Amino acid sequence: MTQLIKAREGIITQEMIAAAKKENVEPELIRQGLVDGTLVVPANVNHKSLEPCAIGKGTKTKVNANIGTSTDFPDPEAELEKLRQVVDAGADAVMDLSTGPNITDTRRRMLGASPLPVGTVPVYQATAEANVRYGAMMKLTADDLFDVVEEQCKDGVDFITVHCGITRQVIDVLKKRRRVADIVSRGGAFLTGWMLHHDRENPLYERYDELLEIAARYDVTLSLGDGLRPGCLADATDGPQIQELLVLGELVERAWEKGVQVMVEGPGHVPLDQVRSNVDLQKSLCKGAPFYVLGPLVTDVAPGYDHITSAIGGALAAWAGADFLCYVTPAEHLGLPDAKDVRDGIMASRIAAHAADIAKGLPGAAEWDLSMAKARKALDWEKQIELSIDPGHAAAVRKKKNPEHREECSMCGEFCAMKVVAEALGTEAECC
Amino acid sequence: MTQLIKAREGIITQEMIAAAKKENVEPELIRQGLVDGTLVVPANVNHKSLEPCAIGKGTKTKVNANIGTSTDFPDPEAELEKLRQVVDAGADAVMDLSTGPNITDTRRRMLGASPLPVGTVPVYQATAEANVRYGAMMKLTADDLFDVVEEQCKDGVDFITVHCGITRQVIDVLKKRRRVADIVSRGGAFLTGWMLHHDRENPLYERYDELLEIAARYDVTLSLGDGLRPGCLADATDGPQIQELLVLGELVERAWEKGVQVMVEGPGHVPLDQVRSNVDLQKSLCKGAPFYVLGPLVTDVAPGYDHITSAIGGALAAWAGADFLCYVTPAEHLGLPDAKDVRDGIMASRIAAHAADIAKGLPGAAEWDLSMAKARKALDWEKQIELSIDPGHAAAVRKKKNPEHREECSMCGEFCAMKVVAEALGTEAECC
């Protein structure tokens, strides 16, 4: 029985209680959100080290970090180190997107070590293995793909990205409507290529009921991938993207019918002024299912700084109602992120998520900022560091820039506004 | 005669032509914007190395970088090195906020070297010198302050921040309405302290006509400082802030009457959902005068990452109509920024500015992104690097992460979506 089915039966599970505790809300709010479909608690029955969390309406905006090997960087140890970094940096979930050798081994070690929900994109492993087995990824069979899905779900993966919405009809729309960047989703690109090559329907769509059975068996949350997400601003909110979203809306309801938890993935590259309408559209077409966005990046021109372009879009998206932000690292569009990139990406997304939670009026969100403001006013550095989103980093910067450890910071020194005003207004005491 | 007076007389100056060229617009648009007061061209008659630009409606969102010595870091050479960094990183203006020794010398060297408009906050020099001369900054006289203003204007400073809006009446409101962080503007804090200490009106308000005469003489643009800008989210858009803004609105019209160019400064720390209303309010109360915002920072809890909290707020503010973004560096709230912090701060603000220009539909803005998208689709790395907002940085990251210099990037390697789809759809050629 999935968390969703249990919720419908009125059962409050240990997972719901654990997720509620993280939010400081009543478990009933989590249960009701599950019933409504506006919230998921990804928790594979076989993921033993998991500390569950909720993703969706009424809870904190969550942040996911993607890690995983590639052919150029195949070392699983490096990815396990990144996982430690991910947990330490305060991400809420992690996806293992390995495409290097030893994908199964890397994933199992990651699942064993991760207290965070772990997601995967099964088609990555399927294509990588087909490449080895047949010498060409296009020779993958639909059965091969479903074998990988089953293997990964059995291993304990909490959520899987499945690009079920790329149907032949969606590809027809793609062919008719010219795009600048065509398809930038790796899974979407492969499936489109496979469908055209074999002149066949998408197996993840055609055999969706079978997929739902596997997901239900292990309580894997489906994350319906947006294979046609825009890869540049010029392609944002276009025909192919919305055509696929329409299909995803139908698939959400079919998942719910089978008691399977489901969320929907979204763009991508989106200009500032289209971010809110993208969220509104997803919420409407997908009946309030949680929305998991990649970025969105609000400009295409900043490789090396795409954690920032994404933080801007992510803050706006989450404020508009997106529930789950997939981080983008400074390495995006240039290469595989290292541990430092991972940390920078997570911090940028956490800032966006928190700024949005304040704007949405999520209970408790603004209190954190109020505590920081009071510590700052009181020039209480210990407290300021402790309350920082990244205490270790804040402490290191402070130390480096203030060798004498003076009371004020080295920017203003003796001209510190806080001190001048406190003396003039006699307000210092009230904030200490 | 100031640029404003010349514009009113129908004269198109060399400065207007130079500014128009940077925007790729007709000089008449610049002249009309000056007449309307919706745009400024800061260009002191004595700043010989200046390459003028326009700040305001119908032009690109501009970015300012603050540099300058402090008592802990008094070396002018380090600041001149930062100035080179500022120019190289593509900022549009620079402010010399020196408070260390040798302020006059530092400023003169900076003015000699800067093609960008240079701004200052005269009260910083005035207080630092009073500290030396009288042993206490509160012993500063109004005449001392005006002597510094005159000296700086004569030296060639293009715009000065003057906190003319902190009147006794505004301070009365401040005293009545409890704030968490009181005053965080250094200039605002000092003036408030001075006024309370001496039980006198703000000399910059009381002798505003004299200030306008000096500004008119050298064509210095006034940047009306927001001394009571909120220093934390809890203080945003509160009584004291808006009371001061009301005064600034009156002072804008008085500057225009005397032919003095003027812009208005704004917050600060502002939650996402209050950013747009802050811009709307300034535009309304200040009759469309250019709006120069610091950040805004959308959360208080991220010291070490405040270039990101500011990029989020800055993008939103500029999209809503703010014209000029003052950068915030990763060192904000912790210490004086070094050259790396300066660069990171500028890039974050430039990203915010450009994302907003796209959203506002500024002619030409989205074309840059379109060119990048085409280069990315074509896997044309040389072009991608060239089109990057920071080409040197993008090139360095690419090189570091892709030792073999392969065609794809090391994130996807042979599973590159661009390649898979181009093969399947046969679209590669059209984008190359």
Image: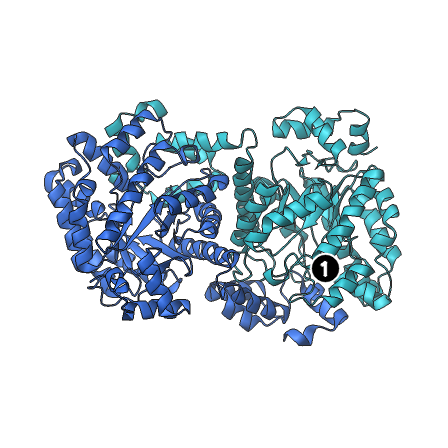
Chain colours: A blue, B cyan
Where residue B360 sits, quadrant-wise, is: top right
The percent coordinates of residue B18 (x first, y second) are: 68, 28
Residue depicted at x 69% and y 73%: A428
Numbered label tally: 1
Which quarter of the figure is the N terminus of chain B placed in? top right
Percent across and percent down for residue B210 are 88, 47
Q: Which residue is mark 1?
A: B240
* Residue B302 in view (yes/no): yes
- Provide residue B430's location: percent of width, then percent of height: 34, 23
- Along the line of sight, the residue nearer the viewer: A140 or B241: B241
Local secondary structure at mark 1: helix
Q: Is residue A376 left or right of residue B372?
A: right
In terms of depth relative to the viewer, which is nearer, B36 or B115?
B36
| Vertical arrangement, residue B351 with respect to residue B419, above or below | below
The amino acid type, in three-letter code, at marker 1 is: Pro
The quadrant in which the C terminus of chain B is found is top left
Left or right, A418 with respect to B134, comes to left
Compared with B331, A225 (above or below) is above
Label 1 CA crowd tier, 10 Å (few <14, some 14–19, many 20+) = many
Compared with residue B209, is residue A231 higher up or lower down, i.e. above or below? above
